[in-house]
Image: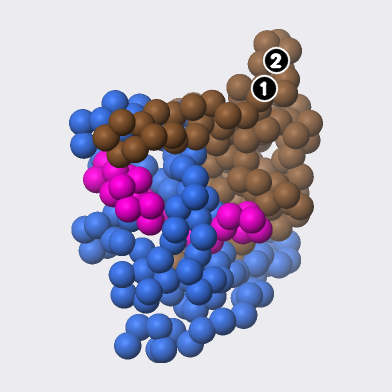
Chain colours: A blue, B brown
């Protein structure tokens, strides 16, 4: 993992970068996660998204439990070189652990002084059937 | 800013959340930034994206210098309630300070042990003409 292209990424004080996963074609934003050097290197190697789980403190090959892996079509880096964008093909069309297509299923409705977050996307697959 | 909907957001240890800005229609991911409570509240109030600049440590009404404001059409929250997605109409079609449509203009090419980041998006507007 001493590859030069990995050095171009500006890892934060924890050795991580934010990652946005976007569906190829529709361009829907599916989820947001983090990667360390090893995760990004593995992602390129496998052609499948590998993140760093901050809660479990280990590499997380997306779909390792659910089967809902993400085939990586393209990897982008932003102007400040501290954020990654993955264009992926989401297996089963379900990226979220709630069984929804995207993790961004809560929509703000209302005004600044009186608003609420409303669920506006359907569950495509029962989470209990995903994680046995 | 004591509104209940703001309390639903899980602010990090610095009182911030990551924010993804996405173009309405094309769904292109334009940029990534951060918000604090005040920034999110202002965004709803104005209907224009207001971020928190971590480098300048102040509110940043996107476009305040360049004129390239972002009109907010929709605000989404993710399943963990710690990431925001904005669907915006990007004025002048230029979100990036380099004069490009999107900040994610560098594409990874190659393999894990020998790759590079290649600029694949054109400059639409000379940055010198943006920031006088």
Q: Nearer the viewer, residue B60 or A52?
A: A52
Whether residue A26 can be seen here:
yes
Where is residue A80 shown, x and y percent of the image?
47, 28
What residue sits 35% from the left and 45% below the top? A44
To which residue does mark 2 refer? Answer: B126
Where is residue A26 shown, x and y percent of the image?
66, 58
Queried whether the magenta region covers residue B42, the answer comes back as no
Where is residue A19 shown, x and y percent of the image?
43, 48
Q: Quadrant of residue A11?
A: top left
Q: Nearer the viewer, residue A113 or B32?
A: B32
In this picture, residue A11 sits left or right of residue B96? left
Q: What are the residue bounds of the magenta stretch?
A: A23-49
Q: Chain of mark 2?
A: B
How dense is the environment of label 2, judged by Cα within 10 Å: few (below 14), some, or many (20 and up)? few
Q: In this view, which residue lies farthest toward the right?
A: B92
Queried whether the magenta region covers residue A33, the answer comes back as yes
Where is residue B65 shown, x and y percent of the image?
69, 23
The answer to whether the residues at label 2 and label 1 have Cβ atoms under 8 Å apart is yes
Looking at the figure, which quarter contains the C terminus of chain A?
Answer: bottom left
Q: Are marks 2 and 1 on the same chain?
A: yes
How dense is the environment of label 1, judged by Cα within 10 Å: few (below 14), some, or many (20 and up)? some
């Amino acid at each position: 993992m001493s590859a030069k292209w990995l050095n171009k990424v500006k890892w934060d004080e924890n050795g991580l970068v934010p990652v946005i996963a976007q569906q190829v074609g529709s361009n829907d934003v599916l989820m947001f996660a983090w990667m360390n050097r090893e995760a990004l290197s593995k992602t390129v190697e496998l052609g499948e998204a590998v993140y760093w789980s901050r809660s479990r403190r280990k590499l997380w090959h997306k779909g390792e439990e659910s089967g809902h892996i993400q085939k990586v079509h393209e990897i982008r880096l932003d102007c400040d070189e501290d954020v990654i964008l993955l264009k992926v093909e989401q297996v089963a069309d379900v990226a979220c652990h709630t069984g929804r297509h995207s993790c961004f299923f809560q929509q703000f409705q209302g005004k600044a002084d009186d608003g609420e977050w409303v669920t506006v996307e359907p569950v495509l697959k029962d989470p209990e059937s995903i994680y046995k």
